[in-house]
Image (spheres, grey):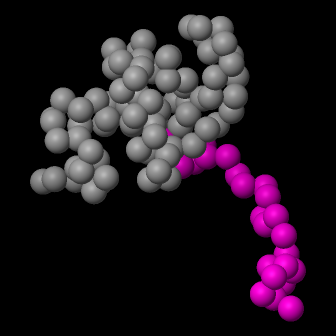
Amino acid sequence: MNTYPQYIKAYCKDNHFKNQYLKAFAGFFSQPMTMKELSVATGIDRANLCRYVRLMRLAGIIAVVKRTYCSITKHLANKYTTNPELFPKNLQLTLFDAREGRGYE
């Protein structure tokens, strides 16, 4: 049974990259971590993780939980998660009232 999302089918023609993508998804799902932390934990190259995170962001299945210092590099980095329960709540409802501005007079 082929359960890969359409965007991953189009991007990853090789099973090796599909497996890496799924391993990255599972790693971010288990607990929020930076790309470098996941790279060290799974052995996936960080350049590949950047591509996978980009694909996940375009699909809306990953979110930045917080910006903190990486435990490996000691630099500021984003902690990502694919667990929807940990996604941050959007506190900004709208920037402008829908009735203000052009076309709403």
Outermost residue on the front side: it is 102
Tell me residue 68's x, y (percent): 70, 22
Q: Is residue 70 magenta?
A: no
Find residue 6 and report its image quarter. bottom left
Write the residue at 68% across / 32% down.
Answer: 66
Residue at 17%, 41% (x, y): give it: 13
The reply to whether the magenta stretch includes residue 100 is: yes
Q: Residue at x 24, y 50 (%)?
A: 10
Q: Residue furthest left?
A: 1
Q: Is residue 64 above or below residue 85?
A: above
Q: Which residues are magenta?
A: 82-105
**Is residue 75 visible to us here?**
yes
Closer to us: 41 or 60? 60
Q: Magenta-highlighted stretch: main secondary structure? A: loop
Residue 11 on image: x %, y %: 26, 45
Q: Would you say 93 lies left or right of 50 here?
A: right
